[in-house]
Amino acid sequence: LRLSDGERESLGRLEDQVRPFRRGTIIIRENEGPRELFVVQSGWLHASAVLRQILRLHFPGDILGLPLLAFSESPETVTAVTDVVLCPFSRERFAGLLGDHPRLGALILGLTVADRVALADRLASIGRTPARARVGALLCEIFARTRRSGGGAGDEGVVVPLTQEEIGDATGLTAVHVNRMMRALVEDKVIARSNSHIRLLDEKRLISEANFVDRTSIETGWLPPPR
Amino acid sequence: LRLSDGERESLGRLEDQVRPFRRGTIIIRENEGPRELFVVQSGWLHASAVLRQILRLHFPGDILGLPLLAFSESPETVTAVTDVVLCPFSRERFAGLLGDHPRLGALILGLTVADRVALADRLASIGRTPARARVGALLCEIFARTRRSGGGAGDEGVVVPLTQEEIGDATGLTAVHVNRMMRALVEDKVIARSNSHIRLLDEKRLISEANFVDRTSIETGWLPPPR
DNA sequence: CGCACCTTTGAATGAGATCAAAGATGGTGG
DNA sequence: CCACCATCTTTGATCTCATTCAAAGGTGCG
């Protein structure tokens, strides 16, 4: 999508501040009223809820804290999985952006809708597929989103900084069972692992047995004209 | 939220057409390219994905087809659960609304974010809680949203037009197990049932054992100024 | 009144959880 | 540079919640 000069400038201004955090840091705490939203500049994070369910992985380019647009208390905890660099901005600043550039608002609405659809995919995965497919779907999502944000990650695989416990929290499984499923995937030569580095050996098969659909690219043709 | 005259008028125009559908009708079909979005005027619908997972219940006031803002092919099937009346409108018309009234765009973004949060709640429910709590959470959601949209539904209960099979599709359970959990809830005097009519006897208890959080009301204080 | 669909119930089975403990790995300070 | 400790991974045995399979009641619509 080609942005107008005004849009580009307003978006750029959102990233004028830069703040680094150590891995493990809690960026937004559940049930507290955060004052800021963030754009992820580098690193991985995850959003989790009660009962340790991991709801979402966040990669560079994502906006953190959108629930603040609907609720004064955060419904989720956002934790840095690796060291991260974030660009904070206020809700008022964001409102100003939406007011000045309705097309950007529509674009962000589109991105939020896409996010909602991806979440729905995960709901179906967790509600209706066996453990192995759930782990597979998570891996597919990690690869699709890493490719999009992190540059390469083509064939050399990805360093996944998640513990098996965290993969379990994301898939609704126990760490023990995640371990067995990952070993089974290695056994069947669908993936290869060494420590935290994972490589896809048979992506077609993984995608098909996990029922995975890539939701990383969205339509922009319908947007209102730029201002 | 108080709308400006222009906002009110533009919103009203979205509902200028009215189209009734019979119960059981498929309104939007997965993997097809729908041409329209809809506002629900009356009736219940549900959105489902492959594997029969029900992703979302839709009540009067909801917008159907938002995924069209991100994807040209619908990721979900929308089916009328009861007879319904819908107001169709085009994506272009919606884009016009967003362009003319950025504050409405921001409001719809807030509503979409709230929807995403509610979906995240269901993900946690399905991923991390036992069957009885999942059924309970669905009932809580139905009561909360019926109250909001359908008027009363205070103490006299609600007629739930879903089969136990459909409740299972929404909660990731089998119809047989849904039946056992519902009977257990009746047995423990948490709910009362006669045919498809359900009444809450001990809402506090149901909410607490289901970990339910009501996400039906959202913040609007941050919105940009109206135009 | 009959048929289709839905609910209810029982028994057997199985996927994943739980419990427990033994290897790996990596970061830290001496 | 190495030893130690915390954290993470792996493995086995057992248990349990939910599924599956099967069949008998209900309910309401045509």
Image (cartoon, coloured by chain):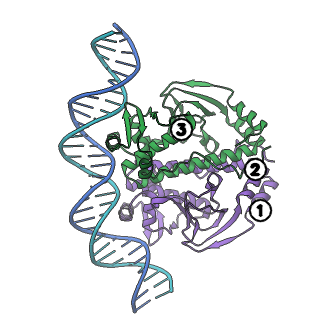
Chain colours: A green, B purple, C blue, D cyan
Q: Chain of mark 1?
A: B
Q: Amino acid at mark 2?
A: Pro
Q: Dividing the picture into quarters, in which one does residue A10 lie?
A: top right
Residue sitting at x 60%, y 59%: B148
Q: Chain of mark 3?
A: A
Report if residue B211 is visible in the image: no
- The relative height of residue D4 versus residue B165 in the rendered view (above or below) is above
Residue sitting at x 56%, y 51%: A117
CA distance for labels 1 and 3:
42 Å
Mark closest to the chain's N terminus, 3 or 2: 3
Residue sitting at x 67%, y 32%: A89
The crowd level at tag 3 (other Cα within 10 Å; few <14, some 14-19, many 20+) is some
Circle 3 is placed at which residue position?
A: A147
Q: Amino acid at mark 1?
A: Arg
Task: Judge depth for marks 3 and 2 and give the one in front.
Answer: 3
Image position, residue B116 (x, y; %): 57, 49
Circle 2 is placed at which residue position?
A: A224
Image position, residue B80 (x, y; %): 56, 68
From the image, which quarter does the C terminus of chain A lie in? Answer: top right
**Element assignment for label 1:** helix
CA distance for labels 3 and 2:
29 Å
Q: Which mark is residue B13?
A: 1
CA distance for labels 2 and 1:
18 Å
**Element assignment for label 2:** loop
Image position, residue B178 (x, y; %): 39, 62
